[in-house]
Amino acid sequence: MKNANRNSETCSFKSNTMLFPLRLSAQSDEQLMKRAAQGNDRAFEELYNRHARRLQGFFVRRLGNDADLAADFMHDTFLRLYAAREKYHEGNSFRAWLYSIAYNLCKNHHRNQLTIVRDDEKDMPAEADIEIELDESILHDALREVLKNLPEPYAMLFSLHYEEELTIPQIAQITEVPEGTVKSRLNKTMNIIKQELKKYENR
């Protein structure tokens, strides 16, 4: 009888769980996107609330600190995501899909400037062990200046990986290049940054 009672309690718990699913705020991005794909607009609104501000910051950096243009691009990204919500496949990374749309908007805006595959890429310096000795306050300002002047293809890679914290596989999916190529270009990007930062040591 005790086992029967336990089974009854388990069934009751499962039933209540189905009747009262996790609050939207407690669900993962992928769970919310699945619900949005099924027509749940509140789930999509939760995704917007989670990611809109950070995505707008990404666009601010990638669009020359133009806050108005960044806001337009952010809203355009979510409009495109909403229009294509039924195409979402369960298990796919939501953030990778979101930044794929954002990346393509930037690519179209910059056009040829954002073409990652460059003719002069073979002439870029290989990764090197460069030591930098800068005070933290100077480093912050110097890095901001270096990133501002970094060619857009490499600034984009830096932003996706180090600022938006996307993984190598996610960036490969977003930029549509092999993972090994992404790693190589990130290494070269960091080497360019280190070489540029060396110029600030004696200032």
Image (cartoon, rainbow, N blue to C red):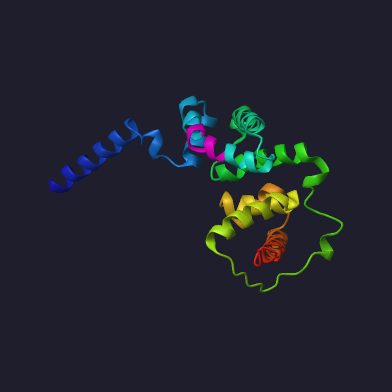
**Is 53 covered by the magenta stretch?**
yes
Residue at 22% across / 44% down in the picture?
Answer: 7
Residue at 47% across / 39% down in the picture?
Answer: 31
**Front residue (pair 87, 105):** 105
> What are the residue bounds of the magenta stretch?
48-55
For the view shown, which residue lies furthest in the right direction?
119
**Front residue (pair 102, 89):** 102
Residue 97 position within the rendered picture, expressed as x and y whole percent measured from the top left: 61, 41
**Front residue (pair 31, 3):** 31
Check the picture and name the quadrant holding the C terminus. Answer: bottom right
Left or right: 162 with respect to 156? left
Left or right: 178 with respect to 55? right
Which SS type dominates the magenta stretch?
A: helix
**Is there any visible trace of residue 170 in the rendered image?**
no
Residue at 71% across / 37% down in the picture?
Answer: 105
Left or right: 186 with respect to 133? right
Q: Which quadrant of the figure has residue 75?
A: top right
Residue 15 position within the rendered picture, expressed as x and y whole percent measured from the top left: 29, 34
**Front residue (pair 26, 195):** 195
User: Number of marks in the image?
Assistant: 0
For the view shown, which residue lies furthest in the front direction?
203
**Is 146 covered by the magenta stretch?**
no
**Is there any visible trace of residue 71 in the rendered image?**
yes
Residue 26 position within the rendered picture, expressed as x and y whole percent measured from the top left: 38, 39
Left or right: 25 with respect to 103? left
Check the picture and name the quadrant holding the N terminus. Answer: top left
